[in-house]
Amino acid sequence: MIRQRDAGRGQSLVEFALVLPILLVMFMGIFDFGRAIFAFNSVSNAAREGVRVAIVDQNQSVITNEARAAMTGLPPDGTSVTFTNCSTLKIGCLATVKVTYSWQAITPIIGNLIGPKTIESTTTMPVERVYTSP
């Protein structure tokens, strides 16, 4: 005859085994969501820093280097920086910097479900000085 106390222990173990995978997937989703928010903040900051350089120096390589330097914690190989300005470069025309990053979930389950996502940010400001560094 099985004692009531021993049967309760087995029931708790079975319930834990049923709930554990759900909890793990939930925690992995929270972890990946946090990484996506971090990536979005880094991309937004990189676009702002890039356009701050673009309003005083319209050299594409200088703008790209500054934007990539501002992307803390993200690998530079998955990023692209695009700088556009008006056709006749003059003070007051708009300089636009667009930074895109290909984000991939680090956990395999979430990564297979949603796949890679493109995170992008665009910032526009008026040119303050017309200058292209060598």
Image (spheres, rainbow, N blue to C red):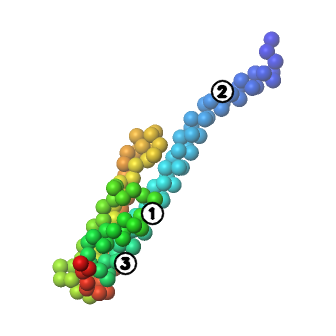
| Farthest residue, direction left | 87
Q: Which mark is residue 14?
A: 2
Task: Report which residue position mark 3 lands on.
Answer: 52
**Taking 7 as reference, is 53 left or right?**
left
How far apart are the two marked residues, 2 and 1, measured between alpha carbons? 44 Å
Pick the front one: 97 or 12: 97
Q: CA distance from mark 3 to mark 1?
A: 17 Å
In the rendered view, tell whether residue 114 sits above or below residue 98: above
How far apart marks 2 and 3 lie (CA) works out to: 58 Å
Say which element carries label 3: helix
Q: Where residue 127 sits: x, y (%)? A: 30, 83
Residue shown at 43%/61% (left/top)? 40
* Residue that mark 1 sits on: 72
Residue in front for this viewpoint, 23 or 83: 83
Which label's residue is closer to the chain start, 2 or 1? 2
In the displayed structure, 133 sits above or below 121; it is: below
Mark 2 vs mark 1, foreground winner is 1
Place of residue 17 in the rendered image (x, y in percent of width and height, measured from the top left) = 62, 30
* Residue 9 in which image quadrant: top right
Please, what secondary structure does the residue beneath circle 2 have?
A: helix
